[in-house]
Image: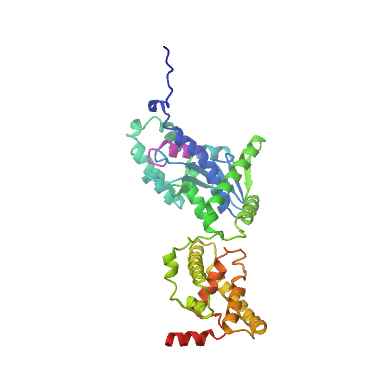
Amino acid sequence: MSTTKRRGPPSSSKRRTEVPGQALGYGLQYTRLTQLLLDAPEGSFCSLEYLDDVALQQAGTGPRLVQSKSALTANPVADRAKSLWKTLSNWIALAADSDYDLDKTVFEIYVSRPAGGKLVEAFSKASTLEEARLAIAQARDMLWGDSPSFALKADVAAEIGPYLERVFNAEPASLERIIRNFQLTQGSGSPQADIESTIRSHPVSATKVADIADHMCGVVKRRVDELLEAGKPAIIARDAFYVWYTAYLRKIDRDTVLPSRAKAPSAEASRNQLPKIFVQQLDLIGLPFEDKLEAASDYLMAAADRTAWAISGEVDESAFDDLDSTLKRSWKNKRRSCGIEHGGKPVEAQGLALFSDCMTFTAQLQAMQPPDHFIPGCFHRLADDMSVGWHPDYEQQLKLKKAG
């Protein structure tokens, strides 16, 4: 009898633990490029794997060269980190082989999470050539030992030795300018969350931020891939990016319908509203008990939606004041019309006609259509503070009812 050997997942001992960090590092360049484009000034250009990992160029100044580091598994800017010294070595080679104006070029290491080290922080703080010179001397003394013996040099790890040689033996004027213009930028730990934070600072609905971030990251990656496939440098104009960005905002952040955030209240919660003034107003016109419970439900759900929409940023609070003004003006006009059309009827019938007319009134809130319960609920809110009423003499009737 033969048996079939069941295949299980690959042995954990064979898992390449460095792969997630490497993959994140590659993907981070696209994310960082998107962030640069969001922050870039008008008329500028951002690129990927052209001048550096990512870079920003604008007229009248030098480029901003950015080396992006994921920091998933280690600190890439630690005092003895290979990535730190390799980056500085690469910039020194770039300075020697190019015509960059080192006095205007910004040399940036972007780390996706808070990370630092004594030396990289000294480099970042250096804002003059003298401070840069002192920071370089501090690094040399720490890693090689005091000049001229450099007693610690023999103990330097082999993986950073060649890079230290290139940095510390570089032409001093160039190295000092690189360090003076060096910048360490630290992310929050989530580059995607950082992009969302930037978008959230723009005038967009809070509920749309994640969708917008996903879309724009995808647009940038696709555009870069298209350029690279065509054999062209991956350079994106900031102004073109904002055309794509604003077009998507118009599409996704201009809803025509406001979704309700309120849950239908329980029967008990609705019954608890029966003593309120807006329900007493319904008593004056003889509305059935079931309709009063429905009115209480509309009142509670509208109140919950007003709060939720204001907190989420979907509706500016001033829009509620504008709506209240519209409802009061509409009620005033309808009251006048009902008085003309139904003036010969009993006062309860006049009030019921006015109430029914207002309950079918429709209005937009911040150019969006609210759910069906919202406008009736807002009318009940106004009726509760007696800004509107249904009985032709509702104010006097409520005073008599209260006195009785």
Residue 38 in the image: above or below residue 290: above
Q: Tell me which residue sits at (51%, 74%) in the image.
A: 381
In this view, the residue in front, 31 or 312, is 312
- Report x, y in % for residue 175: 48, 43
Q: Check the picture and name the quadrant holding the C terminus.
A: bottom left
Residue 359 in the image: above or below residue 113: below
Q: Tell me which residue sits at (46%, 52%) in the image.
A: 128
In this view, the residue in front, 171 or 366, is 366
In this view, the residue in front, 137 or 196, is 196
Residue 278 in view in this figure: yes
Figure coloring = rainbow
Q: Residue furthest top?
A: 1
Where residue 273 sits, quadrant-wise, is bottom left
Would residue 322 appear left or right of 126 to someone viewing this image?
Answer: right
Task: Give the main secondary structure of the magenta stretch.
Answer: helix
- Report x, y in % for residue 330: 62, 77
Give the residues in magenta: 77-90
Q: Tell me which residue sits at (62%, 38%) in the image.
A: 225
Q: Check the picture and name the quadrant holding the N terminus.
A: top left
- Report x, y in % for residue 103: 54, 49
Residue 59 in view in this figure: no
- Report x, y in % for residue 145: 33, 38
Q: Tell me which residue sits at (36%, 38%) in the image.
A: 143
Would residue 211 appear left or right of 84 to someone viewing this image?
Answer: right
